[in-house]
Amino acid sequence: MPFTVRLPLTIALSLFLFSLLGCGEKTVVGTSVSKLEASQNCIDCHEARVSSVTGKSVADEWQLSAHNLSNKAGCADCHFESLTHSLWHPDCTKCHGGTPMGGTKGLPPYAIRNPDSYGSCAKCHNAGGGFRMSVYDGITTNPLTNHFSTPTLADYTSGTYNPRYVTKNYEKSCRSCHNPHDTTSRINILRQWARSGKGDVNALPWKNYDFKTRGTSTPGATAANSFGTDCVRCHTATGHLNYLNTGSIAPFGTSKTDGKEVLACNVCHIDYSYARRQVGAVTTYYNKSTVSKMRIRISVTYPNIGESNLCLNCHVGRETGAIIKELGDANLTANKTTTPSGAYNFSNASFENSHYLTAGATVFKTSGFEFYSSHYYNNPSFYAHDKIGVSNFKNTGTSGPCITCHMKPGNHTFLPVVKDNNGNVTALANSATCNNALCHNGSMSATEIEHQKEQYNAAMGALKAMLQEKLFIYFSTANPYFFTKPYVTNYVETGSCLNQPVKNWLSGASTTDPTYNSSTKKCTSTITGGTVGTGPNNMGAAFNYNLLYHDFGAFAHNRYYVKRLIYDSISWLYDNDIKLTSNALGYLSDVEAAIQNSAVLTAQQKSDAFSYLFTGRGYTTYIAKDSRNWRPGSDPLSPVY
């Protein structure tokens, strides 16, 4: 019988492990061996492998990451499930001997080709840990709770829980935001995003409701053919991708525990190459149904602005001022799909809300309630913000106005300016483009932006004052925004009938004090009188205020359109006549008379409002009762007051 030596299994394993020194499994090597050293044999064989996504060497990318630089994870930590699998990997046995185990290539016992989809990231990064606090730009966030928030049952029941990054649809999908090999080079971009309105888990656009349920489940429903709810397409990542791909506005998900979503990286980027999705010119549908009265369909196709088309899908509002005009017209028009069954009752009508952050519609002047026919709102010949980043207009590139101003160079805060802790503008994010020789040529500074914002706010204050003084309605940041008395925060209805939303939009109407019905737990009041036909314009003036209030950069997006909306709204509210100058105070403009005689505005607010609405292009200092105090953008040869 031949003589044989049978080594104990532990000794055999030890010798085999020694032969594998460098393959990278952290349980294989001693602590004195770095992840780079442990991964060297893998690198020797795979250093020529190029990522199919980024086009770069996989080994080079990994060496740039914190996984290597902080000695946290080598090749085998992610690509092998366990020590046993690495010992009998079918490729390793070619050199090191042993009998390979069976299986499917790309999965254990082979090297895991896609550790992310296999769930390998969760070996270290999970709800139990694997994260440290993130401090960036003076703001501290908790990546652990951002990725894996764990609401209580009470939170789920109340609906007040935060969104999270790793929702059901983003499990085993870390690559939606992260390059799996180089997790570090773009970390500051990800930190910016996490602190922006797109990635902030405390932001209301993601937190306020379980938006994945707020869609229209009717088969085939789209924004074009439906009057139903479509919040899901802009307030969830999955819903937006569905909308871009198929036009669907259907809800998704079956459980609250699936999680609320933020706007993840893969909404705008096709993969971790971070190339932007390409979408064509955007058509937005402003559809409104009043059930028995009328059904309105208004669509707007916006100019093709290249990569910035991505932004227009969700930043042009959900209603425009044209909706109110249609409601006020009892006739069948091209925008109505059914014959109206009578006039819309503006003495008992809920406020029409434009929705929020409607910058794109401001730039292209489609959003506001326009008191004049459209040609009165034509942009001046020198207006160019709608051409920024289009075909390299004036050396501004080809990314379109949104991305050029809000994201360059390399900016994922999505803010076009830099602000201090008090919210004051300290710099322009893309000053190079804004101030190039063909645009503002160095004249647009943080100081100038703050100056324009201050004057704009004063003009908005004048419009707010007119709504209060002429219509006796009060604006609040609480939905539905306009109330019959000043809004009381945290008020719970117990019979005092405070915080009653405005329902009567007619001028001169008389409304009794509301009375509380303990059975229905509602407040009711009686409305009498009121001037027929004034409702649409009165609501339109309120619409313009709310629209511009929620477009935080409106004064910069399209200043002449914004000035005209404010001016016309004040002009109407002053005497319910947009064209006739009726004041007996010697002012050529009713707007000037209205502001001068406001009992609400301070002297400084009046001065700033006048400067914003009247001065510019040769007329630099406001002079009371001057003939140049005309409607913004008027032709000096035939001015409009």
Image (spheres, helix red, strand yellow):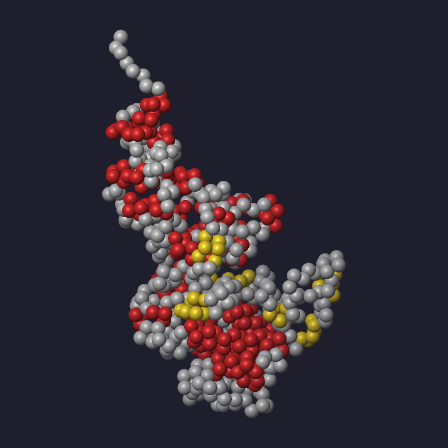
Which quarter of the rendering shows the N terminus? Answer: top left
Residue shown at 46% from the left, 74% from the top? 450
Tell me where residue 207 appears, x and y as whole percent: 54, 54
Tell me where residue 140 appears, x and y as whole percent: 48, 55
Query: In front here: 462 or 4?
Result: 4
Query: In front here: 530 or 145?
Result: 145
Residue shown at 51% from the left, 80% from the top? 608
Residue extending farthest front: 32
Q: In this figure, what is the number of numbered marks?
A: 0
Tell me where residue 423 appears, x and y as whole percent: 49, 67
Residue shown at 45% from the left, 46% from the top? 131
Q: In this view, does 556 lie above or below 621?
A: above
Q: In this view, does 81 lie above or below 552?
A: above
Residue 4 in view: yes
Tell me where residue 37 appears, x and y as whole percent: 30, 39
Q: Is residue 241 left or right of residue 327?
A: left
Q: In which quarter of the image is residue 519?
A: bottom right
Residue shown at 49% from the left, 46% from the top? 148
Residue 321 in view: no
Residue extending farthest right: 518
Query: In front here: 311 or 371?
Result: 311
Query: In front here: 30 or 230?
Result: 30
Residue extending farthest bottom: 586
Residue extending farthest top: 1
Q: Is residue 586 left or right of residue 194?
A: right
